[in-house]
Amino acid sequence: MPKKTEIKKTILVIVLLTWTCLAHLPGLKNDFINFDDRTHLMDNPMNSTMNIDNIKRIFSTPVLGNYQPMIGLLFAIEHLLVGFNPFYYHLLNLILHLCNTFLILLLISKLINNQQIAFFTALIFGIHPLHVESVAWVSGRKDLLYVFFFILSMIHYLKYLQQGKRQFSQYGYSFVFFLLSCLSKPMAVVLPLVLLLIDYYQTDKISIRQWLEKIPFIIISLIIGIISLNIQQEAGAIQLNQHFSIFDRFTFGAFTFISYLLKFVFPFPLSAYYLYPIKNGFFLPFIYYLQLFVFLFFILLFFCVYKKNKNFTFGILFFFITIALVLQWLPVGGSLIAERYAYLSYFGLAFLSSCFVFKNKNPLSNNMTKILLVILVMVILIFSFLSFNRYKIWKNSDTFWTALIEKYPSFSYAYAMRGIYFLEEVNNKELALIDFNSGLKADPNSFKAYSGRGCYYLKETQFDKAISDFRKSLMIKPNQQEVFNNLGLAYYLSGKTDSAITEFTKAITFSNTAHGNYLNRGNAWFDAENYMKAIEDYNIFISYFPNHPLVYYLKGLCWFELKEYHYALKDIETAIAKGTVEPEVFASYARLLEELHRFKESSATLQKAITLGYNVLSSPCHFDRIEDELNKKGNKLFYEQKYDSALMCYSEALKSNSKYWDVYVNRANTLNVLKQYQLAINDYNIFLKHSYFNHQAYYWRSIARIGLGDLKGALEDLNRTLKLQPELSQANTLRNQILLEIDKK
């Protein structure tokens, strides 16, 4: 008999996990969603490496207004193993959900000696459509992980109770898993109340001793709760300034409680967002007051029944305790209801449903049980289909936000987020602009649509328009670090370095964890020739991204400008050792080796830079269509010998973009012809700073120096020219002429 029982249990486990897995299988093909996934993963510097310092940061740095370091640690480990392949992140989510489903089977088996109730409770939990959000959404990992530790804590506490409290180690395990659950998501702080509920279910009472046993748990709950409230308030997640009264808040709590109850039985229609209602004067829509009445009636019903049916009491109280913190008594987030919040709490309702089917005391119990079982199986089949089908919405950011736009056609945030997806991930600028404009049409005060459209203009190098939109976004919602950062980029790319530094500094002030801001400000300090400040910012960035080769290169350039060549050598060699194949890095390395009089190595390194694609006659630059047209027009006028007009075109191009380095050499050549030699030399100097190995520029600068009578300087330039291009006959001829002139003197 025991062997047959074990075989039956094994079959039940296989059926349970297989059925649950099939319901959620489509999620493995899905992509990341730009609904927090980028912030948690790709843009999170704490995923960049695994070392003691980084682990300390993970446990001391909140992300998106939440303190959940276990999630950060798991993401960092996952990134180390599989990079950013979405399949593996979805796979781990599914595995965690299967583990939770199995743990619920174990928990109910220990709580109540009835395999049917345990199996169907776990199966309902495993396939319920509202749980798709937690499994399909990579950032929903926090719900999966905190529930995993939460249920383990409950199981070990049950063992502690059932083993006569002599096995104190089980109490210790329960406490450790509770702590891990809190560090995965602060919603776990309600566990002490759940443990008291288990005490009540097991002993029909709650004694003072049972309260005292929970003191260590309660202390942790208070600490984590206070930390989380402070973090969320600082991040603006708790929006106390919304225009809703205390009575409205109570009504929302009642409405959401009843809504979660109803969606357990009727899980449709579903949505990733449930927007707050619009008040008609002083009043909410009628449905909210109706559900408030239902809520009050439900409380009355509970007090009439709770002593008569222990299973009913346990199921309802478990549901209420585990969802009470997110019933919008306090306005947390922008969504009135979130399906992920029901992930753990629906365990209580699944338990209650299974008990109703298999512990019904009707005189026609057997027939009634069969009827209820048929209904339950039909419901499970429907729920499985709904869950399977729901994954289409979570396929990618396009399907996700499109579904929300179909549900809420005036939801400007959804238009903006879909626009950001089109702009950043599929590079469809036309669709992105349509969505940003649609978002602003739906809500002229949409800060997200303005910031998104600003990013569009930034990509299109329409910097004035980008700056205007970023400023409008900040007027609507101040303190957005990412918008300050983008505003800084717009100023930086338009050549307004001082303004860029100001905006990057603001971005850092509002979020010192967005470490890309330090890199951007470092670049701005570099352009402002404040090299030590640039090095400081690059060092901060490197402390979070130690494997980013180009930042070592930039830091090396700073040391070079400070003539600290040995420090420069160390950083540029580090950049090369970390795998960079950028030709500019090798060109700069060649220049540095030359300064250190390692000429043979310098020559070989320059040849490698050329092999990688380095163009010694040009320089890296950023320009848009307007500046390019001005440069081309200037070149045409130059060849037509209309030098004054050409000079104006070149100057206009540089006024528009001071980093269009090739225009400097064109303007310098024009100034040379106009015999404005010193101005020409100034432009050649700027150009050669960015194109050190351009032999033509050295040759032309030698002509300007001859014009000023600086024969020694001209000779140096010609020597440099011939070193880079020994076959340039006119340079050799001019050099010989200068040597004769010097000999005469």
Image (cartoon, rainbow, N blue to C red):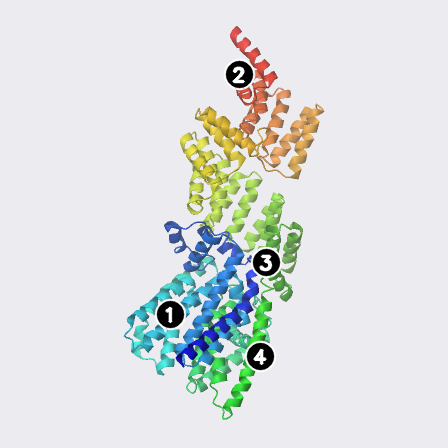
Residue 715 numbered tag:
2
Outermost residue, bottom direction?
Answer: 363
Given the image, on which type of amino acid does mark 2 rest?
Leu
Q: Which residue is mark 1?
A: 153
Q: Which residue is mark 3?
A: 397
**Gap between marks 1 and 3, in whole Å?**
36 Å
Residue 454 numbered tag:
none
Q: Which residue is mark 4?
A: 378
> Is 730 above or below relative to 395?
above
> Is 533 above or below relative to 355?
above
Earlier sequence position, callout 4 versus callout 2 = 4
Task: Assess disc 1: are there few (<14), some (14-19) or many (≥20) residues with their C-alpha within 10 Å of its C-alpha.
Answer: many
Outermost residue, left direction?
Answer: 166
Q: Secondary structure at mark 4?
A: helix
- Residue placed at 59% from the left, 59% from the top? 396
Q: Secondary structure at mark 3?
A: helix
Given the image, on which type of amino acid does mark 1 rest?
Ser
